[in-house]
Amino acid sequence: MDSNLIIDDDYVLRLGAECQRQGKAVEDLLNRYLRVMAMISSEAVPDGEIHRATVEFVNQAGRLSGKVGEASQLVSKICSSFIAQVDGDDQFLY
């Protein structure tokens, strides 16, 4: 490891916050998409094989809802924990 390694705390924390913000944006887009697909399956294609396939797709894609947000929150927590860990491990330097 490079003995001159410098960790920019603010950068790491901003990166975690940006990841969380992007995760929320993806979640919002996914939820809007699922609402549109549900409307299509109920109004544009109210029965038949395409309807059943669209409903199944919406159900399966709906299982992703919340997962992106959870993952991005986890990244943000990991960034914060990383900074805390480095600060704790390097306490003797301060």
Image (tube, rainbow, N blue to C red):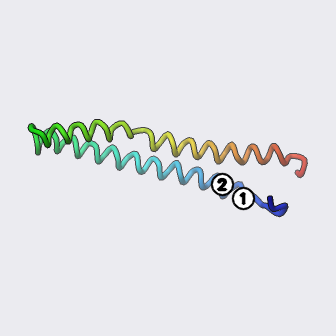
Distance, label 2 to label 1, CA atoms, is 6 Å
Rendering coords of residue 15 (x, y %): 60, 55
The residue lying at 12 percent from left, 41 percent from top is: 43
Q: Secondary structure at mark 2?
A: helix
Question: What count of labels does the image hold?
Answer: 2
Given contact means CB atoms under 8 Å apart, are the residues at marks 2 and 1 in contact?
A: yes
Callout 2 environment at 10 Å: few (<14), some (14 to 19), or many (20+)? some
At label 1, the amino acid type is Asp
Residue under label 2: 12
The residue lying at 9 percent from left, 37 percent from top is: 47
Residue under label 1: 8
Rendering coords of residue 57 (x, y %): 26, 41
In this view, the residue in front, 39 or 4, is 4
Q: Is residue 76 left or right of residue 84?
A: left
At label 2, the amino acid type is Val
* Residue 62 occupies quadrant: top left
The residue lying at 57 percent from left, 50 percent from top is: 17
Name, please, the residue furthest toward the left. 47
